[in-house]
């Protein structure tokens, strides 16, 4: 199969043959979204994992062709041959080795999408060596892609043109919203939306624990907190009001909410978020330097 995509007719066409290297938290979430029967993509989607056990999770799935490096040392090279898009979803520190491993097996026209934090496209292009005609795109997705509600920032490397970027945009739009950004903004995207679900889960953990300390059972606390978060999030999405107005709508002057919000604002949440996001960006920069 040729890796050459007819990029001119792409908008109407199904997404081309796609290989995903790594199906952990992030790769697995994107994969789950792509597997939705409503997504027009060439099937089976080819995936590789390190362990045979991870690949075995796809046994019996006729939309997935799963192989493991443990069972077949050639698995990654075999998996990328003929792929139109290869999504690299291994840990940042493994990325260069995996790219070097597959470089010779990539065909001209393949788009290589890295979702790794802290690995610049230039480093991937360098690891590609002589592989000709391979376009590199950085993507920073998040795990709600699992349910088709992800947010992904994408940025072209020097070898990717508008058509390649457009195809990657279409691919990630099947699992949520997509923002096209400059590569120097990818670390900031990672800090806000890439890691963002963890901040919200932390909030849920702490709220549930506080509700339990008020005397609710774990089950009751879960119902109260998770229902509040998902309901409020949906209200925010559907409302024309911004979050500040939505907050004011539940904060009557001299009321109970006002008292609690005063306590939270007393913790200087703005400064706290600035520090947290800066720490995240700094970690991406450290990974870049490694
Ligand atoms: N987690 C997030 O929310 C998030 C958000 C944005 C971006 N990212 C990026 O996503 C990437 C993956 O992170 P993750 O959290 O998904 O990691 P993870 O859960 O540890 O998954 C890594 C996957 O890579 C596979 N793997 C390792 N070595 C391999 C090899 N040589 N050949 C084929 N597959 C191999 C592993 O296989 P086994 O299952 O057999 O171990 C596993 O499926 C990272 O670069 C990270 O920066 C993550």
Image (tube, rainbow, N blue to C red):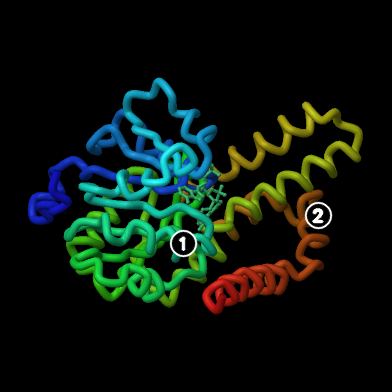
Left or right position of 86 against 192? left
Looking at the picture, tell me which residue is in the foreground, 44 or 248.
Answer: 44
Q: Position of residue 18 (x, y in %)?
A: 28, 45
Mark sitting earlier along the chain (2/1):
1
Secondary structure beneath dot 1 equals helix
The reply to whether the residue tagged 1 has its Cβ within 8 angstroms of ligand 1 is: yes
**Residue occupied by mark 2:** 260
At 49% from the left edge and 65% from the top edge, which residue is drawn?
Answer: 189
Q: Is residue 39 above or below residue 276?
A: above
Residue position for label 1: 95
**Foreground pick, 27 / 149:** 27
Q: CA distance from mark 2 to mark 1?
A: 45 Å
Taking the image as shown, residue 220 lies to the left or right of residue 90, namely right
Q: Residues within 10 Å of mark 1 (few under 14, many from 20)?
A: many
Is residue 279 or residue 47 the one in the foreground? 47
Quarter of the figure with the C terminus: bottom right
| Number of marks present in the image shown | 2
Q: Callout 2: few (<14), some (14-19), or many (20+) C-alpha neighbours within 10 Å? A: few
- Judged from the image, the secondary structure of the residue bearing numbered disc 2 is helix
Q: Nearer the viewer, mark 2 or mark 1?
A: 1
x then y, percent, for residue 75: 37, 43
Q: Position of residue 28 (x, y in %)?
A: 47, 41
């Amino acid at each position: 199969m040729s890796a050459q995509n007819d990029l001119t007719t792409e908008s109407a066409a199904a997404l081309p043959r796609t290989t995903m290297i790594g199906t952990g938290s992030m790769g697995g979430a994107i994969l789950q979204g792509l597997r939705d029967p409503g997504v027009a993509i060439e099937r089976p989607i080819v995936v590789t994992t390190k362990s045979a056990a991870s690949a075995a999770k796809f046994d019996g799935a006729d939309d997935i062709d799963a192989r493991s490096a443990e069972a077949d040392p050639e698995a990654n090279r075999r998996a990328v041959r003929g792929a139109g898009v290869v999504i690299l979803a291994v840990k940042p520190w493994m990325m260069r080795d995996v790219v070097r491993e597959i470089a010779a097996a990539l065909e001209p026209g393949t788009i290589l999408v890295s979702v790794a934090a802290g690995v610049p496209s230039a480093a991937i292009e360098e690891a590609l060596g002589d592989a000709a005609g391979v376009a590199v795109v950085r993507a920073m997705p998040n795990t709600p892609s699992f349910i088709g509600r992800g947010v992904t920032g994408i940025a072209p490397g020097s070898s990717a043109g508008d058509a390649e970027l457009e195809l990657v945009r279409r691919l990630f739009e099947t699992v949520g919203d997509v923002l096209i950004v400059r590569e120097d903004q990818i670390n900031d995207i990672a800090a806000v939306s890439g890691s963002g679900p963890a901040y919200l889960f932390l909030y849920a953990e702490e709220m549930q624990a506080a509700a339990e300390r008020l005397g609710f059972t774990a089950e009751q606390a879960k119902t109260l907190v998770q229902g509040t978060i998902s309901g409020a999030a949906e209200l925010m999405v559907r409302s024309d009001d911004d979050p500040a107005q939505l907050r004011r709508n539940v904060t009557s002057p001299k009321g109970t909410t006002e008292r609690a919000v005063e306590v939270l604002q007393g913790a200087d949440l703005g400064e706290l978020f600035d520090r947290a996001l800066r720490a995240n960006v700094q970690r991406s920069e450290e990974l870049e330097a490694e």
